[in-house]
Each structure stands twice: as structure tokens, then as C-alpha cells.
Image: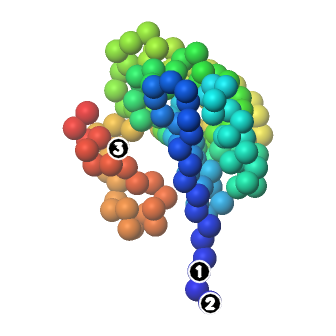
Amino acid sequence: MGFRMVTRFRAYLLGTEGSSVSYFANRRFTVIEGRLNVCNRKTLLSEMEICGVTHANDLDVTNWDADHCAGSELEALLGLVRPSRIHCPGYVPHTVNGDTCLAIIEAYRHEMRFSNRGASVRQITPAFIANLDHARDLAFQETYDSTLADI
């Protein structure tokens, strides 16, 4: 019998514009976008339970716009999923919401320094993407859309 890996992908309803997604593979749980509200909270918790995880390995924020990362929701999301790694845009935010999100992420990283798990924050810049090996060489551990290199 060959290697079998359980994967799950879930897009959550928010009841408003924006996106909230999770991906589970190889016992790693990733939350995509910094959104948490009354519409997706219960289903996100249910998905984590189904996957048998108590925290997210990663939080990936694709951009600083409020429909992808809401400053009013991010702190609650971080407290709920407690990611070990956060990937965020490598460009300077151009809105108050983006500045707020970046400050919340930095405060979370600082707070986690004193926990037994810690947390790292990686800004995804064009230079970072250019230095990545091909996805097949990384066994899909870190794969980014090459169109981000134009940001």
C-alpha cells in the first residue's frame, strides 16, 4: 500500500465581502487570511476539531486590504488559532487597516516569544520568492504564486 495523506480544504462564509480559508495536509493546519467573525468562527473551530488540531501551524495573509485581513478581527483570530508561523505581505501597508494588522502581528510575535511555542513572522517579498527553490524541491512545504513577484 502506498503513502496516504489526508488533505482538507475549506472556504468559510463570512456574511460580508472577503475571504477566509483553511488547508490541512500532512498534519499541518493553515489558515489563509486574517478574518474571524460570527459567521466563520464556529465552522473554523469545527474544522480544527475534525482535523485533530488545537492550533494552526501557519497563518497566511495575502494582502493588507480589510477583506483579507481585518484589523478589527485579527487579534481574536490569533488568539483562537495561535499560529506558529505567520506569512504576510512584504510591502508597506498603505491603509490604517494594514498598519493596524501589521502592529497586531508584531505584538503577537513579541508575546509568543515568552511562550513555550514561539512564533515567527515572515514577510513575503519579491526577493524572498526569487530565492525559493522550485516547489517540487521543497515537497510543497512553501509554495507561492509567482505573480506575487510583481508586487
Residue of label 3: 128
Dot 2, crowdedness within 10 Å: few (<14), some or many (≥20)? few
Q: Looking at the rendered structure, which numbered label has been put on residue 1?
A: 2
Q: Where in the figure is residue 128, as x and y percent of width and height?
A: 35, 43
Nearer mark to the viewer, of 3 and 1: 1
Bin the neighbour count of mark 1 within 10 Å (Cα to Cα): few under 14, some 14-19, many 20 and up: few
- Which secondary structure, mark 2? loop
The residue shown at (63%, 33%) is 40
* Residue lying farthest to the bottom in this orientation: 1
Residue type beneath disc 1: Phe
Q: Is residue 15 visible?
A: yes
Compared with 49, 150 (above or below) is above
Residue 3 lies left or right of residue 17; in this view the side is right
Residue position marked by numbered label 1 in the rendering: 3
Would you call the spot at circle 3 few (<14 residues within 10 Å), some (14-19), or many (20 or more)? few
N-term mark: 3 or 1: 1
Q: Position of residue 32 (x, y in %)?
A: 51, 40
Q: Residue at x 45, y 25 (%)?
A: 17
User: 87 or 1: nearer the eye?
Assistant: 1
Give the quarter of the figure containing the C terminus.
top left
Determine which quarter of the picture holds residue 56.
top right
